[in-house]
Image: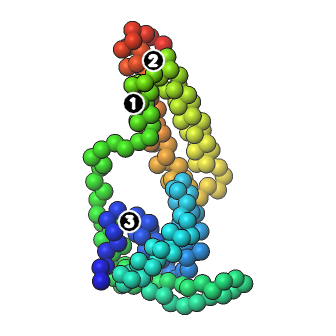
Amino acid sequence: MSATPAAGSTTAHVLLGLLAAGPRHGYELKRAHDERLPRAKPLAYGQVYATLGRLQRDGLVTAVGQDQAGGPERTSYALTPAGRAQLDSWLERIETPAPYVTSTLLAKVAVALLVADADKARTYLVAQRRAHVERLRELTAVKTAPGADLGAVIAADFAIVHLDADLRWLQTTLERVANTHGEVRS
């Protein structure tokens, strides 16, 4: 029996963290995930239950009861001491910066520069920059909304910093395209 979720299994560790607050069933875990990580990709119910099954198999969570309040029977799960130790270990590990950049944005720009002329590449870059600026406005509105949830603000901050880095890179790339082709427009 392994007591370690698969390497890179962020979902398993997030579920362990949500269970640290007390027992919950899968529906509650999915809802709590989506509320606490509002800018993350929402979890599918199937993913929640499959992950709970693996965590239970590995002794990191245990079923603690059944509930059928107005719907289908739901099993509640609780964190085991081994699960808490695994969660603490995961939280203490420093994340290594990724050795490779994997981004659809980078791939599209690289391909656009390979297959398109400078004007088409520039058009794509400018359109992408506009989309990034619009998303920055949306996220700023989330942060400044009256009574904004701390989790939503932190998630918005994270996304804004990444969008800002993308915008700086897009501008640098536009300048490089212009310089390579003897242009000064951007």
In the rendered view of the protein, which quadrant contains the N terminus?
bottom left
- Residue 75, given in percent of the width and then of the height, sits at 56, 85
Q: Dot 1 lies on which element?
A: helix
Q: Residue furthest front?
A: 115
Label 1: few (<14), some (14–19) or many (≥20) C-alpha neighbours in 10 Å: few
Mark seen at residue 9: 3
- Residue 86, given in percent of the width and then of the height, sits at 33, 75
The residue positioned 50% from the left and 69% from the top of the image is 47
Label 3: few (<14), some (14–19) or many (≥20) C-alpha neighbours in 10 Å: few
- Residue 123, given in percent of the width and then of the height, sits at 53, 22
The residue positioned 61% from the left and 55% from the top of the image is 148
Residue with the mark numbered 1: 110
Label 2: few (<14), some (14–19) or many (≥20) C-alpha neighbours in 10 Å: few
Amino acid found under the numbered disc labelled 1: Ala
Q: Earlier in the sequence, mark 3 or mark 2?
A: 3
- Which of the pair 148/101 is nearer the observer? 101
Which numbered disc, 3 or 2, marks the residue closer to the eye?
2
Compute the Cα span from label 2 to label 1.
12 Å
Q: Left or right: 93 with respect to 164?
A: left
The answer to whether mark 2 and mark 1 are in CB contact below 8 A is no
Q: Where is 124 relative to 10, above or below?
A: above
Q: Dot 2 lies on which element?
A: loop
The residue positioned 43% from the left and 24% from the top of the image is 115
Q: Residue furthest right?
A: 70
Residue with the mark numbered 2: 117
Compute the Cα span from label 3 to label 1.
30 Å
Q: Left or right: 12 with respect to 132?
A: left
Q: Earlier in the sequence, mark 3 or mark 1?
A: 3
Q: Dot 3 lies on which element?
A: loop
